[in-house]
Amino acid sequence: MAAIIRAALFDMDGLMFDTERLADRVWEQTVPRYGYAFGPDDMALLRGVSYEAGRRALAQRFGPQFPFVQIHAACTAEMRRLLARSVPKMPGLDALLAFLRAHGVAMAVASSTNRAQVEEYLETAGVRGFFGAVLGGDMIERSKPCPDIYLAAARALGVPPEECLVLEDSYNGVRAGAAAGCETVMIPDLAPATDEMRALAACILPGLADVAGYLAGRTPR
């Protein structure tokens, strides 16, 4: 555990924004129109992974004929329609961003969602200006749980991984942050903390509002 944390690397869906529940509902309503039953266990295969990793996972689940490209496009369009005017922020997000900026901590977003959509949500929510780098799953060859996106985010900010704090809600995200050598904190949303997560994460916190206290005395200023 580093004495000083110089950068905070944020996941997006389910961590910064309360979008996971909405995405679940959209997918579970859309997929049956294409002739497939789709429930929570299927949706869990998409959580915390990139477009390509999700495509492979559902092809393995339903067969290579599963029309992932069409379904993903339909779900993405519906999500954008629903979130065009307002993206629901997780409690404590604004205060945490202000705290990190005031204390000299650089910030990046490292999301498995495609970068264009990440940028759109950040702009709509009015928080884009806090982040020195924004990385999406389409920019990385290997998806979470591989460490690639967090290593890339650390490089983009010019901060060693061991001086970065990763904030995650998903299992694959926690695995990725830990594999990158970052101090990783899990803030559970839809997926509860497990023994594996408690072993990998430096800490499990109830919400974003608890991060400032966790970092007390460990920021550059």
Image: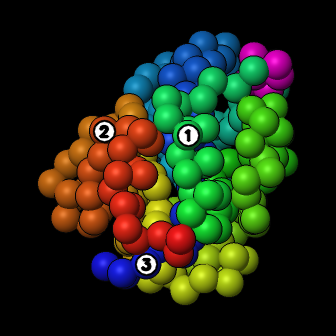
Q: Where, by quadrant of the figure, is residue 78 drawn?
A: top right
Residue drawn at (29%, 63%) of the image:
201
Q: Quadrant of the N terminus?
A: bottom left
Question: What amino acid does circle 3 point to?
Answer: Ile
Question: What amino acid does circle 2 point to?
Answer: Pro
Mark 2 and mark 3: Cα distance apart in space: 22 Å
Which of the labelled discs sits on residue 206, or is there none?
A: 2
Which structural element holds mark 3? loop
Q: Which residue is more in the foreground, 76 or 18?
A: 18
Q: Which residue is more in the foreground, 63 or 152?
A: 152
Residue density around tag 3, few if under 14, some if 14–19, many if 20 or more, within 10 Å: some
Residue density around tag 2, few if under 14, some if 14–19, many if 20 or more, within 10 Å: few
Question: What amino acid does circle 1 point to?
Answer: Ala
Residue density around tag 1, few if under 14, some if 14–19, many if 20 or more, within 10 Å: few
Instruction: Give whichever of discs 2 and 3 has the lower sequence position.
Output: 3
The residue wearing badge 1 is 95
Q: Is residue 76 visible?
A: no
Instruction: Give whichever of discs 1 and 3 has the lower sequence position.
Output: 3
Q: Whole-percent x and y of residue 200?
A: 27, 66
In the image, farthest residue toward the left: 195
Q: Is residue 48 above or below residue 23?
A: below
In the image, is 219 to the left or to the right of 125?
Answer: left
The residue wearing badge 3 is 4
Q: Look at the image and give the residue range highlighted in magenta.
A: 79-85
Residue drawn at (73%, 58%) of the image:
131
Q: Is residue 22 visible?
A: yes
Mark 1 and mark 3: Cα distance apart in space: 20 Å
Q: Is residue 150 above or below residue 40?
A: below
Residue drawn at (62%, 58%) of the image:
102
